[in-house]
Image (spheres, helix red, strand yellow):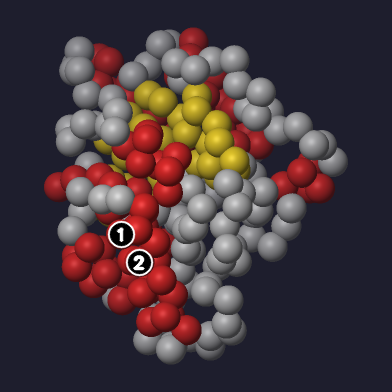
Amino acid sequence: MNSYQLISFEEEIANIFNKGLIKAPIHLSYGNERQLIKIFKKIKFNDWIFCSWRSHYHCLLKGVPSYLLKKEILNGRSISLCFPKYKIYSSAIVGGILPIALGVAFSLKLKKKKDKVFCFLGDMTSETGIAHESIKYAINFNLPIHFIIEDNNESVCTDTRKTWASNILTYSINKNKKFITYYKYKNKYPHAGAGQRVQF
C-alpha cells in the first residue's frame, strides 16, 4: 500500500460521507502517509496493532482489504474498527485502548512469544494520566510494546498545546527510541468529518 492508495481511499470515504451516506462519525487522515508506511515496514503480520478512532490507514497498512474496511465504515464502525484476523483493534474511547495493549504485551512476555504490540495514540491522549502510567509500566517491566504518538495538534476542536499551556509536549523530546516513536503532521481534514456539515 503506497501513499497514493492511502490518500485515494480517504478521499473516497470523504466523498461518500459528504453525500450523507455514512450514518456515523468518521475521522480521516492525511499528511502522515510517509511516516506510517515507514513504521509499518517494521510490523509483522503476527504483531498486534492498537489505535484510536483515526485508524483507516492503520487497517490498510496492516493488510485489511480495502473492500472489507469500506464495508465496516459504511456500516457506521469507522471509529471502532476491529479485525481480529489481522490483529488490529481500535477504540473511540480516549486512552481506552492503552491498558488493553499493555495487557496483551504483558501476556506476550509471560508466554515468551516473539510477537510485539504497536500502540498508536494522538498528541492529546499522550498527555493523559492513563498514557503516562501505561508507558511507564511498559518501560519499567520491559514489555514488548512500542508506542507511536501521532501529533496533529488537535483534540476534538481544541489545540493540544493551548489546552496544557505548553509549547512542548511530554514525548515530543523523545529520549527512549526503544519504546516511543513521536512524529508531527498536518491533517487537511477537520478532527471529525470531511469538511462539510452532515446531519446523521
The kind of residue on which mark 2 rests is Ser
User: How many badges with numbers are in the image?
Assistant: 2
Residue 199 can be seen, yes or no: yes
Mark drawn on residue 5: 1
Mark drawn on residue 112: none
Residue 83 in the image: x percent, y percent? 22, 52
Circles 1 and 2: CB distance less than 8 Å?
yes
**Residue at disc 1, secondary structure:** helix
Residue 24 in the image: x percent, y percent? 43, 76
Dot 2 crowding, Cα within 10 Å, few <14, some 14–19, many 20+: few
Q: CA distance from mark 1 to mark 2?
A: 5 Å
Specify the farthest residue to the right. 165
Tell me which corner region of the image, top left, top right, bottom left or bottom right, holds residue 48.
top left
**Residue at disc 2, secondary structure:** helix
Residue sitting nearer the eye, 190 or 188? 188
Tell me which corner region of the image, top left, top right, bottom left or bottom right, holds residue 142.
top left
What residue is drawn where x is 46% and y is 20%?
179
What residue is drawn where x is 60% and y is 37%?
126
The kind of residue on which mark 1 rests is Gln
What residue is drawn where x is 35% and y is 66%?
8
Which residue is disc 2 drawn over? 8
